[in-house]
Structures are given as structure tokens and as C-alpha cells.
Amino acid sequence: MAEATTLSVHRCRFVDFTPSAITALAFPPLPLPSIKGKKSAGSRKLLKFGTLAIGRANGNVEVCEWTGTENSQIEAPQAWTVRKTLSGPHPSKVDSLAFTIRYPELLGPDDVPTCSDLRLFTAGGGSELVEWDLEKGSVKRTISSQGGSIWCISPNPSSTLLALGCEDGSVRLLSIEDDNLVHQRRFDRVKSRLLSIAWGPPVPKQKKQNSSQTIDDGSSDDDDDDWIDSWLVTGCSDSSLRKWDIQTGRTVERMGTDKVKGERTLVWSVGVLGDGTIVSGDSLGMVKFWDPKTCTQLESFQGHGADVLCLTIGPEGTTVYTSGVDQKITQFMLVKTSPSDSSSLLRSSSRWIQSTSRRLHSHDVRALSIWPPYTALPQSYKRQFPMDVAPILVSGGLDMSVVATPAALPTSTVTKVQNPLSTSTVATFEDSYHRRLAYSSGPAGTSSVSIARGARLVLCRGDSVLCVWRIGAKKGEDVDMEEFDFDAEEEEGEGWEKVLEMELNVQTNLVASAISGDGRWLAVSDQYEAKLFQLELQRDNALKPRRIRDFSSILQPHIPTLPTSPPSTGASAFAFTPDSSKLVLATTMSSYILVVDLGVSSTDGSITSPRVLRRFDHHRMRNVLVGERVVKGRADEDSEGSDIEMHSPTDVGDDAKPIPATVSRISISTDGQWVATTDDHCRTHVFNLDSIQHHCVLPSFPQPIQALSFSTSHASTLVMALANNSIHIFDVETRQFPDWARGLCGSLPKRFTHLHDPVVGVTFDTVVQDGGPSGSLRNVALFWGSTWICKVKFDAPIGWGGFSKKRRRETKKMSAVTQNQRVTVDDHQQQSNFKLVTHYRPLLFVEFLDAGELLVVERPLVDVLSQLPPAYFKPKYGAT
């Protein structure tokens, strides 16, 4: 057995990264059912999980995808992971957020819209409505509200109109049919702000028409199969709700809420059920239910101790969830009443009750959403969902983390309800365990922290700020790597110093940054412009940045743009070569890969002007041709003769329209020969930096790659990990998946693949001479997520638990001798490989700084929350 190796750990908590608060959440709507085929709407078909959009206070929008695969679509312990981050203008914020379907007529009633089918609209407190380009990750168009600040937005159920509630007290309707965005009409103005808005149930068009006027021609079938919006409701700032008629644009009824001491009550949230019942939440903590015809109050609950900021309706329309300043999420249920409880025939056979409440957040809750989403439809067209799969309620607020909670009804006890989050067997909202989704410091689930190994520098990127710290020399305390017990750390206040802090003038929030290994170069970019700095060491050990002014003009001739689009040199990812002589970058808007020579002389170290060596456009191709076939997916690794030999792709025909993707990760091998790039369309390309040519393309994986790195001991071995914590190993030199890795990748233990936080990165110890302090770490990789670090041995013999039978027999003998050892043989074998450490959290970055030195960057949640204002607290007993 090899000697135990030691590892020094730099536990860094001085990186002052602070995530942004969550201000909006949204799921895509489902297509409306056909009017003629209302019987088919009763089928309980299992739906795929939809895209989740997260709006943050810094103006960014995160587009998250469900991590479940086709084989295990229902259960996914990692839930939603960030697939793309839309970088907002700086400074800005997101207050309201809404998805619509671009062409609803192309989708069936049971189809779940994907990103290509959706349009995304946001409003950030100003008068501009923003539509985002989900493919390019940038702003597609903006339009003025013509009525002051936009307080709320809401699309109609058929995704043809978008309603805006404005500062001047009027509702603006915008037409979004046929991928347009134009003003259609303005409602009458009232003397109040419109804080919230919701559409009433649509009415079938054929019921609105007189039967004598209908035409039986086949050409009128499409026109008859349509829905008409009749009314909408708004929550106002003058202690009232107002019901509006769509046809006339005038107020039909006014519903007054409670007041306290003459102050105005603000109706922050409003919703509508399928039967027309209106639900409202106001600044007094009251949740009220209103009759749609008489506009009188049906039920009133003191559900919260402070403002109700958000509400959402369960998929069946029989539950309502509300939350707000008091951090509680309260559930209201529609229950049937017995005949004896009805003193009058006019009283309904069901009533709303306040059933339960849970505190899942530490500060104000700003947004609620649920999947499957609720669509307010008449009873005969009501959509049915499977009873054995629990809905997922997501919430977010000032504590910056999305919380996902199973929300099955307590009445769903006829059949066993499956929990998609795999947090607990129980799936009801009252008793189930919730999941806190980890926040990522960089776009698309990447880390905003990077290091310069040679100069021992740590770089952290904020919205518009860059900070650089220097790590001191290695201290004396070491840690036993075989035991994987990272307890040795540098004391606070020693061993590090801040050497640079830059405030940049940017158009959008920063999206990418990198620092070269020797600490002489720093690259940073927002959505539209990349900047390159040369760092000079001062006498006081501080760094002085000197900007390369003509860097954008050097890149611009190599980035073709359309006449209609503005020129952009922004980069979505950077990577410096190990010798710090070249920079590889991926452009944001056009998905080009540029290889830039930094102009460093190999003889005297003098620097000339940088120049672009070559541009690659492989991430823009619709299909990649390999030999005579199109790469559509990956063959089964376990099948015989499945060695996939990848050849250089031939030229794609002119008829193949380019589809730009966002390149999120770039990795360069330690010898500087290979560079791997991957995008959000699950495509991974490998380039040869020695010959500056494209080398091969990997088969498309079912999900985008979350972690990408070359091994330090075998420079041609590329290690990849997906969001569902599956591992793939590819030999770049031979262009195939090696035989020795198939057993490892195909037999990952469940305690690794079922970790609740997805993998973020993978790192390898730097190669040293044999017999050195890290000599036995050559085939060891450290995978890490937000709350865990896992050591994986690639050279462990494949067998039960990753070991041979001989090792298992020896372990069995040892366990028989040691009577006090309560660990079973199988548990011991499972824990020998894939050893987990979970006492570092939340992790922003894990990387080897030098041979035997591991850098662990933490940002404890307590430190982040301590910077927030005090949370709402009302003592239950006494005055304090």
C-alpha cells in the first residue's frame, strides 16, 4: 500500500463575493387546450419539467433546466441547474418576469414549451419593458410603457397579449402575436398605482358567437377554435382591487380592502381561479377571496404578520400559496363541507381554509412559483395532472437562494406520491423536506473565482468590480490526503493580502474573467466588450493594471457582425495557456473561438501588440458532420465495438443556418497543446494549439457539461461531469472514450450521483517527481460542488465498490478481528473511493495552487446574511 500523502489546505474566507437577492421567479405557461377536443383535456399525462427563470436584484436573469434524464425524468436530486445567465444592464434590476409562448398554435395541449418556443419579458422598475434573446443571452428589444414606471406585467393565457400595470394608473395592452411587440390599447386611467395584475379565465370563442352567424366552412375551423379574454383584475395602491372589462377598457367594479389608521393598504399580489374567484394579498398581511360576479368578499384570513408580497395557485386550482415579509409560506386549501354545515341552500358546498404555514427563508420572500403551472380555465376545460407526482413549489427572496419544496395535496393518499426532489418519502407541503438550491458565483453555473498558480494570486469577479489577493507561502501544517481530513488551514488575517481592486466602466454586468499563470495578464469582459490588462508589480507588492487600449480594435476585424446588430467584442469565457503566451476566448454574441497571441517574446520577455492567430466557428454550426454522418448523440459505451473514433469534421453546406450558442467553459491542457470548449447546446470541441487547428468534436451529451478539465498526469485525458453528477472521460489523442474509464463511469455510486448539489468543477494535483509529496495523487481527481468535495481514484480496480475481491476478503478479515467496528464491508468499500467531505460550505472555488497545496474558497451563508438588514420579527410574548 502506498504511503499516506499529505495536503496543505488554504481555507480562504476573505473573498467578499455576495450573491444578489432574488426578486422574481417564473415557469413557462402551458398551451391552452383545444375547444373542440375538451374530452382529451381530462387525460392525466405526465409532463416534463419546464424551464425556471430566476430574476435577481442586480439585473441578471438565470435560465435553469431540470437535470432529470429521459430514463429518470421524474426524480432528479439536483433539481434545476443554471443553463444560461442573461447579463443585465449595469446598473439595473428585475422586478417582474414573465414567459410567453412564441407560436402557441404549433404546440399541442400536453406539450411543454422549451427555450426555443419561449419569449422572456422583464421589467425593472423603470418605464422600459425588455424582451430577451434566449439564444444569444442578450437584450432583443425594448419598448416604453408610455405610462411611467412598470409595476407589474402579466401575459394572457393564450400568449397573445401582455398587460402592463403602470405608475400613471392605467393598464397598457401590448400585442405579442407572431413574435411582435407593439402597443395595442390603453385602458382608462385611475388615481392609483397598479401594483399587481392578473387575467380572468378565457371564454371559448364559439360560445360568444350566435349559432345562426357561424359558418360551417372548413376555413372557419381555425378561427372558431379560439379563446377570448373577457376581464382582468388589478391590485392598487389605494386600498382597493379593480376589475376591468377587456372590450371597453373601463373599470367594472371596485373592491375595497381593510385600512388601518387612515393609511392606504397596498395590494401587492393578486390571482384568479378557474371559476373566476379572485385572490389578493395586501400590506396588512391579509389574504382575501372575492366573488367574481358580485365582487364581494368571500373569505378573509390574517395569513401573515406583514406584507403579502407574492402568491401562486396550485396546479389543480384547489390550493393557494402566499408569502412575504414575515418569511412564512402559507397554504390555503379548498375543502368540501358537509351538508350539515350548510345553513342555507345558497351557501357553497366548499370553502377556503388556512391549512398550514412553513418558514423556509431567513428574510423577505419576494417571489413564488409552482410547477406544473396553473391555468385559469372553465371547469369543463380544466387540465388534469397525474396524482402520483408531487408539484414543486419554488420560492426566493432576500436570502439569495431558491428553495424548492414538494407540494402534494394531503388528500392525495389514494396512491403513493412520488417526490421529484428525492428529499423525503413524504411529498406533502406540510411534512416534506425542502431543498435549498445552491447559488453560483458565475454565469451558467461557473465560478467567478480564478487563480494564477505561478504568482499565487486569486481573482474574484463581481458585477462591475475585480479584486485580486495574493496567497502567502505554504505554512507548516499538512493534512493526510488518504484520510481526506481537511482541518489544517491558515489563520484568519495571515498569509494573504489584497493587491488590486478595480471598478470598471461596463455596459452590462461582467460575464467572464481570467488571470494568467504568471500573474502578468488579466482579461475581463461584459456582454459587449472584452478588456485586457497588463499587471505590473509595484514596490509595495501591489499590482498596477495597464490596459491594452487597442485590444477591442484588434478583435473586431475577426468577429463578423450583421449590419443590423451592433459591433461586439464581448467574451463569454477566457483561458490563458500555461506559459501565459496565448489567450483563448469565446465571443458572446457570435460564438466564435479566437486564439490570441499576447506578443510575449520567448527570449527577453518583451511585449509587443497582441494579434489574433485564428478564428474557429464550430460552435455556430447547426449540425457537425463527422466523416459521413451527423453527430446526434453518444453511442452506448457498454455495447461491443462501440469505440467512437472521431475525425475532423468536413465543411458544412451553405444551406445549414448557423445557430450561435453560448460557450460557457474553456479548458487548456497542462502542456498547452489541447484546448476544449463546450457550449449550452451540449456540444464540445477540441482544438490543437500547436498547429492551431480543429482536432475533433465529442458526441453530444444529454445535458450541458458542468465541469471540464484536463488531467495533469495525462495531458490528453479530458474529464467531464454533467449536472446530474455523471462522469465522462475522453482521450483526446486517440479520439475515443478509453476502455479503462468505462467501468468507472458506468458504476458511479448513488451517494455521488444523488448528491443534492450538482458538480461545479474538477481539479487535479500538479504533477511532481516520483517520490515527491504528491506522488500518489496522479490518478486522483477532486470533484466539488457547492457543499461537498469528492476524491475519485481513477486507477482503482473495478469491482464491487471499486475494489477487487481480494481487497474485499482482506477487509472482511479485518472487520472480523475488530469487534467494535460497526461499519459493514460494503460500506467500507464504497467509502474508500468517492470519499466525501462536506464541512466546507458554501464553496465558491476549489483548485490546487501548487503541488500538495489545495485552495478552498468559502463564502459562509452567515457572513452573507449578516450584511442584510434585520429580518422582520414580531415577538409573540412580551414587548421585546
Image: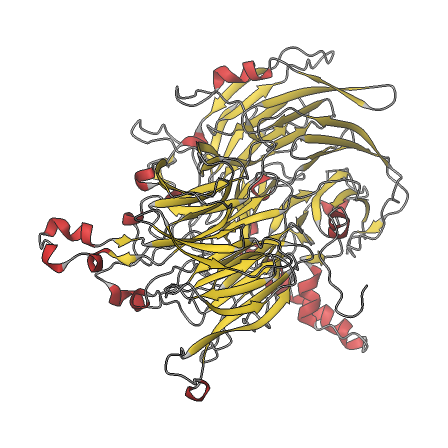
Snapshot quadrant of residue 730: top right
Give whichever of 73, 201 is nearer the camera.
201
Q: Which residue is drawn at the image coordinates 16% and 53% (left, top)?
A: 221
Give whichever of 778, 344 is nearer the camera.
344
Q: Which residue is drawn at the image coordinates 44% and 40% (left, top)?
A: 645
Snapshot quadrant of residue 846: top right
Give whichever of 18, 549 is nearer the camera.
18
Q: Which residue is drawn at the image coordinates 44% and 89% (left, top)?
A: 340
Q: Is residue 486 above or below residue 657?
A: below
Place of residue 119 in the rendered image (x, y in percent of width and height, measured from the top left): 41, 42
Q: Is residue 679 above or below residue 217?
A: above
Instruction: Say whether residue 250 is left or right of residue 147.
Output: left
Place of residue 322 in the rendered image (x, y in percent of width and height, measured from the top left): 55, 61
Instruction: Say whether residue 45 is left or right of residue 327.
Output: left
> Where does the C terminus fall, quadrant-wise?
bottom right
Place of residue 603 in the rendered image (x, y in percent of width and height, measured from the top left): 72, 12
> Where does the N terminus fall, quadrant-wise?
bottom right
Give whichever of 388, 475 is nearer the camera.
388
Instruction: Say whether residue 547 is left or right of residue 540.
Output: left
Q: Is residue 270 above or below residue 459?
A: below
Place of residue 800 in the rendered image (x, y in percent of width and height, measured from the top left): 61, 65
Instruction: Say whether residue 205 is left or right of residue 114.
Output: left
Residue farthest front in this picture: 262
